Amino acid sequence: MNVQEVRTELERAEIMIKEHYDLGEVVSVGELHGGFVNRSFVVHVERNGVQCKYMVREYNSETAEDGMQFEHALISHLTKDGFPLVGGVIPKKDGGTYAEEQQIVEGRIVIRFWAVFEFLKGEDRYTFMDTNLSKEELSGAADALARLHHAGRDFCGPPGAKPARPKIMDFLPTFRQAYAEYSEMAGQTRFDQCFLKYRDGILEKLDRALIPDSDLDEMPQLPIHGDYHQGNLKFEGRRVTGIFDFDWSRIDIRLFDLAQAVIYFCACWDGQEANSIDLDKYGLFLRSYNERCEAADPPLGLTAVERARLPLVLAVANHFALRCIIHFYYREEDPDVEGWLAVLNHYREIVHWIEAHENRIAAVTYRACTSEFAESTTNMVAIPGPEAG
């Protein structure tokens, strides 16, 4: 744990590998782009004439050590039980799962954590804004999420380790204070003006998104990914071959993971349906997820309470995405104002869309979780929901 002078990211990644791991001779190091929170690298090593590659992560300086311990423990639990879609944590020479670095930045010591993971096979094909997945990819992503939930269902977390994020219903009430802080940071850009103009309306709808404790008690809680979107999956052909970025994982209602996935996978970004949820895709995703859950041993299909509350949790998941966008904008030194503004308006308008189409969402939810599911769900508004039998 040496104090490092400022070096390039690639130099620091190589140093951490050589000092803390016994993987072989480092051949090359390259950065993997695409993340907002942490930085990742691909490292090629050679031992006895055989080359291998690993994924190396440099955690954000704000990363809490106990949150990282939770993440690594969950990944180790999944890989130990043979879940094939997760890259295992590679142990250091001393058996630990992460290395600590003290780096001097602008005259002060900054502590950063590093970890090495198996490199997942497959292609990084999408970002969180890409929703042009095929039906097979969409169904496979839902199936993979259900398998992930089933594989992790008996994980309780290591003693003393605290997930990086609180449970969503504990996190939601903190948004008001966060938005007040962002308001103080706001300047004169079009993003700032939009945020300030709609802030109070967003908070008003946020207050209506809280789930009663009586319903929460009836919802299965288990380890969730916490950031399940197409940008965190790998594909080969039409198959999902890997799930990564577990740094927001925690034990929470699984319905939030499902709802968050719907917000990402089923959103419409362009055309006449922009800033809405594609109900055909929603129905397919939900059916694929629920069928895999029902086929598991033991079966754990969506409960009646989960089905009834799914439209509300979709709104919760969208509020979470909206807050993330605002947070990332205000933490950047030189943000792309127009780019961030487009994403802000997307999630802001979906808030209203979900509220206006709650009955349609409920009808599709009912159909997708029963044998009555049909390929096309676009005109489902008149189909009876569970209350009508």
Image (cartoon, grey):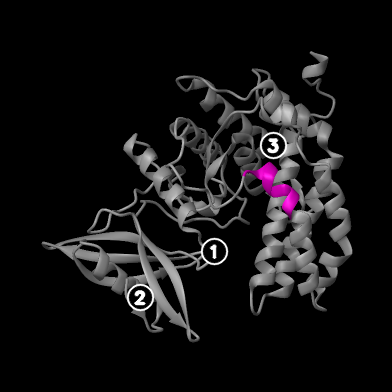
Q: Quadrant of the N terminus?
A: bottom left
> Magenta span has 15?
no
| Disc 2 from disc 3: Cα separation | 47 Å
- Earlier in the chain: of badge 1 and badge 3, it is 1
241 or 72: nearer the viewer: 72
> Does 87 sit above or below residue 43?
above
The residue lying at 46 percent from left, 46 percent from top is 160
> Magenta span has 172?
yes
Residue under pointer 1: 37
352 or 39: nearer the viewer: 39
Can residue 283 be seen?
Answer: yes
Q: Quadrant of the C terminus?
A: top right
Crowd tier of the residue under label 1, counting other residues whose Cα lies within 10 Å: few below 14, some 14–19, many 20 or above: some
Residue under pointer 2: 12
Magenta residues, as a range?
Answer: 167-174
The amino acid on which the numbered mark 3 sits, given as a three-letter code, is: Asp
Residue under pointer 3: 280
